[in-house]
Image (cartoon, rainbow, N blue to C red):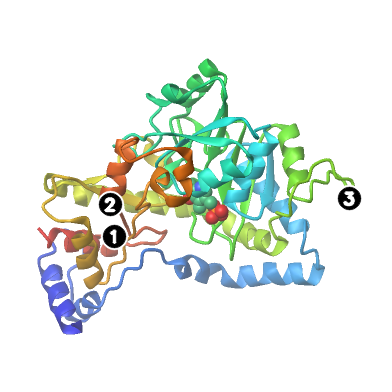
Amino acid sequence: MDLEIRVRSLKISIGNEYASVKQSSASRNQHSSLKIPFVDLKLQHQPIQAQIEEAISTVVQRGDFILGKALADFEESFAAASGVKYGIGVSSGTDAIALGLQACGIGAGDEVIVPANTFIATLIGVIKTGATPVLVDCDLDTALIDLRTLNKAITTKTKAVVPVHLYGQMVAPPQLLELAQNYNLLIFEDAAQAHLAKRDGYCAGSVGRAAALSFYPSKNLGAFGNGGIVLTSDSKVAEKVRALRNYGAPRKYFHTDIGTNSRLDTVQAAVLNVKLPHLAEWNQSRNLAARHYDALLTPLKSQGLIPIHNQSEDGHVYHLYVIRVSADCPLKRQTIQEELAARGIQTGIHYPIPCHLQPAYQYLGYKAGDFPNSETLCQEILSLPMYPGLSNHQINYVVNSLRSLF
Ligand SMILES: *Cc1c(COP(=O)(O)O)cnc(C)c1O
């Protein structure tokens, strides 16, 4: 088995017309044992590990584990970087959606429009407020919520829309704002995959009344555990989230809301403070890697492999690099995944089952066929390895491996 992989890889490296470096026999040997993980977090942590340990140690010495100094510092820095006035750290991205929407006045009896093609947490956040998610299909090329059909989902109960900046690409801000204005809808961005993404001069999290982001470890900015933040420039919304995350108390032992316990730990904020200054550079590295993928994959379009379309150029922060194994492709997605795995390349599917077909959400009353583009994408999408520091050499290997299958 091992030998078979080695022989195969060797053939690929010899036939590699894109490789910029000629393979010496030593590096060919290395190439043949190349393993490309889906995400490599060690790569980003190693150079700053000492700094992170020092930051954690400072929190331990101060002992301000809950709502401490590092949290206030991080909230201020991250809000400023995203172009908004306030950041309120919470326990997760899911809570950021729930508490952020609640602070915007969303609750029972309201309808909130969300894309059918998203991670399930978008729906969970909406449902936690007591509101009902109303699903809208996505655009097949960008995988983002289809703004052209969104108006069909609007009823007298519709209060808000939650655009999801999926895979790291923002939903077009001008069109979104125009639509929201025409129908008097509140915009609440799910920017959990889009830290510092840009489009048309807007930064992710600064388009709507408020936004939610996640610091799940593998997100573009990840903590050493769970975490999230609500961003807003509205002081009332900010105050409300601050109370909601802290037992509903705007000041100690005075409870205006039932609220919950959902603060971002000071230790996590300390980690994020060290990582934040690197985020722009990491995002840029992802964008460059994606451009390299795009260029190499162009000849494979004729085989039905189609990258999800980037309409925001440098502003796309590529949380994920996703291609479609379209109906025109002679190979099955599963076969491609297995063959890549046999060559040491990890891939993923984000996400394999659309929200409206998940067992827990049958009560919403949707059925197969309701959101054809989302359903098609779930069948066709494949996420290739993507992380800051993924080298051109590694990308060459991934694409050459793909080419070798046809
Ligand atoms: C990760 C993610 C969330 C949830 O964030 P958690 O921190 O895991 O709760 C919400 N929406 C999207 C689009 C995500 O990718």
Q: CA distance from mark 2 to mark 3?
A: 53 Å
Which badge, 2 or 3, is on the more N-terminal residue?
3
Residue displayed at 68% across by 32% down: 105
In the depicted structure, whether residue 380 falls above or below residue 70: above
Which badge, 1 or 2, is on the more N-terminal residue?
2
Q: Quadrant of the N terminus?
A: bottom left
Quick check: is the Cβ at mark 1 less than 8 Å away from ligand 1?
A: no
For badge 3, the amino acid type reads Lys
Residue displayed at 87% across by 46% down: 251
Where does residue 51 sit, x and y in percent of width and height?
Answer: 62, 68
Q: Quadrant of the C terminus?
A: bottom left
* Residue pointed to by mark 2: 292
Q: Secondary structure at mark 1?
A: helix
Which badge, 1 or 3, is on the more N-terminal residue?
3
Q: Secondary structure at mark 2?
A: helix
Few, some or many C-alpha atoms within 10 Å of disc 3 (few <14, some 14-19, many ≥20)?
A: few
* Residue pointed to by mark 3: 252
Residue displayed at 39% across by 42% down: 117
Where does residue 16 sit, x and y in percent of width and height?
Answer: 14, 64
Q: Among all residues in the image, which is located at the extreme right?
A: 253
Quadrant of res 274: bottom right
Q: Among all residues in the image, which is located at the extreme top?
A: 182
For badge 2, the amino acid type reads His
Residue 49 is at least partly visible in this image? yes
* Residue pointed to by mark 1: 392
